[in-house]
Image (spheres, helix red, strand yellow):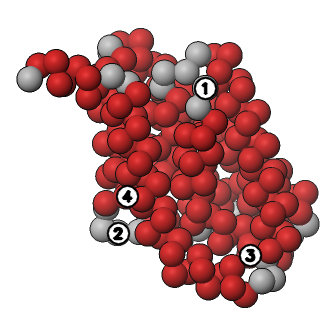
Amino acid sequence: MHFWLLTLTFISVNLDFFFMLLFLLKKYRVQQVMLGYLLGTLILLTLSFTVGKVLAAFLPEWLLGVLGILPIYMALRADDDDDDAAKGHGGPIVTVLVTYLSVCAGCNLSIFLPVLAGESLAHFGLTLIFIGVLTVLVVLILKLIADIPVVTQVMDRYGTPLMKVCYILIGIYVFWDSGLLTHLLSWV
């Protein structure tokens, strides 16, 4: 299990949502934001793992490396459709959950799917725990720094380019880890 890859993936797919979290934390209690965000994260991870397992049942592992194109595509696409969050109906937890799913579903599914496709069920369980802990830590850290102006300025200036670099690195790692590059080089 590659904790550094999971951490990089989690941060890169959620970087833009961290801004939303800052606003949600000013509007709702920490526990409400944390629970909605955690539920959304666990739902998207489970979907990514399930789809990855279905694909892995029918395709050789090295061919699944082609899925590394998804994070690279996400980094290079011209438009940024993640800015419009859905307005949730219901309580604060449902509002945070719906907002997270509407903002991050596409990125999370396309980025985590290739990362989780090769994991066993036991490793996936550890992944859920690890990402759950990261989710809680992020909310707590963001609550502490939400009022620091320099944090908002830095994220506004460097957040998008940093997120794109992370997506590309994840895509390249998926190419390498799946054996796709080795398999393609064996043809040469």
Tag 1 or tag 4, which sits nearer the N-term?
A: 1
Whether residue 165 is situated above or below residue 150 in the rendered picture: above
Q: Residue at x 44, y 33 (%)?
A: 114
Tag 4 or tag 3, which sits nearer the N-term?
A: 3
**In this picture, residue 104 sits left or right of residue 87:** left
| Residue pointed to by mark 4 | 75
**Where is residue 120 drawn, in percent x and y?**
59, 16
Question: Closer to us: mark 3 or mark 1?
Answer: 1
Q: Quadrant of residue 43?
A: top right
| Residue pointed to by mark 2 | 79
Tag 2 or tag 1, which sits nearer the N-term?
A: 1
**In this picture, residue 24 sits left or right of residue 112:** right
Q: Which mark is residue 167?
A: none
Q: How far apart in space, not on screen, are marks 4 and 2 (Cα)?
A: 10 Å
Whether residue 25 is situated above or below residue 39 in the rendered picture: below
Which element is circle 3 on?
A: helix
Question: Closer to us: mark 1 or mark 2?
Answer: 1
Is residue 43 or residue 11 the one in the foreground? 11
Q: Is residue 33 visible?
A: no
Q: How far apart in space, not on screen, are marks 3 and 1 (Cα)?
A: 33 Å
Q: Is residue 3 visible?
A: yes
| Residue pointed to by mark 1 | 1
**Where is residue 90 drawn, in percent x and y?**
80, 60
Q: How far apart in space, not on screen, are marks 3 and 4 (Cα)?
A: 25 Å
| Residue pointed to by mark 3 | 23
Q: Residue at x 89, y 63 (%)?
A: 30
Asked if the residue at tag 3 contacts the one at tag 2, i.e. Cβ–Cβ closer than 8 Å, the answer is no
Q: Amino acid at mark 3?
A: Phe
